[in-house]
Image: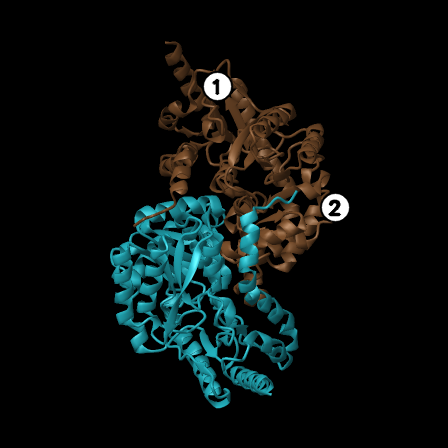
Chain colours: A brown, B cyan
Amino acid sequence: MLKTKPEYDEMLSAVGRRLQSNAIRKLTKLLGSREVISLAAGAPSFETFPVQELAEISARVLRDHGRFALQYGPTRGLSGLVEAVAGILRSRGIADSKPSEIVMTTGSQQGLDLIARVLLDPGDVVLVELPSYIGGLIALYNAQAELVGVRQDDDGMVISDLREKIDRALSEGRRVKCIYTIPNFQNPSGVTLAGERRKELAEVAEQYDLLIIEDDAYFDLYFTEEASRLMPLAALCPDRVVYLGTFSKVLAPGLRSAWLRAPEALATKVELAKEGADLSSSMFDQAIVIEAIREGLIERRLPELREFYRIRCRAMLEALERFAPAESHWTKPVGGFFILMQLAAETDAAAALPEAIENGVAYVPGQSFFVDGSGANTLRLAYSKESPEAIKDGVQRMCRVFQNAKALVEG
Amino acid sequence: MLKTKPEYDEMLSAVGRRLQSNAIRKLTKLLGSREVISLAAGAPSFETFPVQELAEISARVLRDHGRFALQYGPTRGLSGLVEAVAGILRSRGIADSKPSEIVMTTGSQQGLDLIARVLLDPGDVVLVELPSYIGGLIALYNAQAELVGVRQDDDGMVISDLREKIDRALSEGRRVKCIYTIPNFQNPSGVTLAGERRKELAEVAEQYDLLIIEDDAYFDLYFTEEASRLMPLAALCPDRVVYLGTFSKVLAPGLRSAWLRAPEALATKVELAKEGADLSSSMFDQAIVIEAIREGLIERRLPELREFYRIRCRAMLEALERFAPAESHWTKPVGGFFILMQLAAETDAAAALPEAIENGVAYVPGQSFFVDGSGANTLRLAYSKESPEAIKDGVQRMCRVFQNAKALVEG
């Protein structure tokens, strides 16, 4: 009787392995009461939520705009918010951004899902970074795309490898549709696409007639002046880019308020897909975000948010330098929430996790993020949730476990 | 470069005609400043929103639970809310309802979308009522289902016609997957599935091994004692029913908080699909709804909500009896928001709409709701938005237009 789609079942089992991060998340939550230091959860720290300000805004929104904030609303989003987002896009160098190109979404996850549904036929090839954000990969898998991984180095996606992968897929007669990238402070690697690479990536998209899905969730959370000057790909080639931004990291993810910006004809299709998907995102959340923008709450808090995460990133980097086992490497983020750590080739990060949790620290094994199944010796470390002291403590505990695991392997 | 899916384009044009209600909605909104009486919008009246109470709850939620209400949360929904929904389901006679069968959704629209995605392969046949809710039809079309219409009379879906349509589809070698029904105070017809028919429908589902998607958005808004005693299909055959309920009509649709209840194995797949679709619905909205349930706000207001809509329904029925042209018929709802009006066979409700708007009243032409393309002489009238006086005035204006249209046809 439960005649679900056979492909869906296949997809579920294919994705199953990659969903272990979800299991980890649950495990971490379960162990929360045991005071485990979580370097796993990729969420903003609740210390950064402007609770008091949002309480005042919520009350005001309901008092002054309750009739709209509590009613059904336009699928594209409240017009005041769409216009505010157009302003944000222009401030990021995406010139001439118009409301007709913007759709508000229930988190960037919905933007990824909608664009995948509108754009992809089963079997279409999408180029993704090695490693990449699991939620993005799931949205692409759900549209039955074939995901092909592209190598990253410290400057982000390696363009020669990108070309090679595209050429190979084309020579195999496959349809190559688009490139999914997180250029700034990537989840999970923490790596940033260098300025020169951005131009090259735009050229590749032009040359092969591809669309770029640019997931820029961490844009505002840079730690260096240099990182603040990087231009979105959507600023370089707006006609080829679907640009995703969110208020989750700079305000609060529980409000589920994000946006998608695409060439107008594509945005219209995304709007139609969204109408079928949820009619609209929360009107109350949108009305709150409008007010938060209008009264400068978001803009005003950015410097302290950057400092908040910069301090935690430094604490983690210092702890890694001090405690990490020999033969391990890690990325040096200039923004965002994450560091990717690479252990000695023979160390299995997933296998070491239970012992790490026993020792009071959790992380996400990296293999889940690699579409080619590599990365068993990698792990994602998030410095976004814990205090600098807890981060140091957690890294020390974790590295002790890795030392033991290595000793065991070398036995 | 905008290589969207060809099927998607086809789907868009196929659905295009049916989306005229959307155009009407926009038109209605445009004309809002011209004081048009809207019998078109299928939304709850904003007079029913408990603005003050929600302002107090919002402030309390942020003060006491801000860390959770503003953070990422579980895809299935906040556990307190899932448990509260299990209680609601049990109170509706859906015995043994467990949290493991429930997924909170971004409005019931998302529930429809997720179940369609999980359940349907392209070409699968879904039986739907003639007429039916456009949002539900869109979700099913988006999964590339073939929709087959089943006749309704004053007692809801005609079971003999249902059997006939299933038999025909099967004899044509098509896969018949499920039945989509809105048994209570249906949108757009206002018709209610009679108690005896519910048993027969459950038998049909059993006999043909079909799943039922039961969209029960209006459950609480009955006007008669008899209507209050009708059992959901999910109470009759829980293993065969995906049951959708919502807080949109009894609290506020802007909060986008609804639920889906399905047999456990299916609920697990829906959860996974939702993870890819938006990670979770608004946590803030969910936290507010929990509090609204806990302090009895929703339950307490139901009697006055029923009275609110009952009075408006009566006003519309009285106005129709007084002003409707000869040869027209209309349904007599025992709950919900809608009346379906049927004009003389030769009158085109869509063609008459511009003149109706000229005369200060808007409605939704009915053809959009009929998957077989019939219903050109029908229209949906919503009594949910306007005051009883405005409803009478609007119906009078509208009927005058229909009289003219008829006179014109008859020359």
Question: Marks 1 and 2: which is nearer the front?
Answer: 2
List x then y, in percent, for residue A109: 52, 44
Residue with the mark numbered 2: A95
Residue at (61, 33) in percent of width and height: A335
List x then y, in percent, for residue A266: 63, 49
As drawn, A309 above or below B368: above
To which quarter of the image does residue A204 belong? Answer: top right
As drawn, B27 above or below A330: below
Residue with the mark numbered 1: A343
Residue at (53, 76) in percent of width and height: B39
Q: Are marks 1 and 2 in contact (CB under 8 Å)?
A: no
To which quarter of the image does residue B96 belong? Answer: bottom left
- The amino acid marked with disc number 1 is Leu
Q: Crowdedness of circle 1 by 10 Å Cα count: few (<14), some, many (20+)?
A: many
List x then y, in percent, for residue A170: 59, 30
Residue at (38, 35) in percent of width and height: A13
- Disc 2 on helix, strand or loop? loop
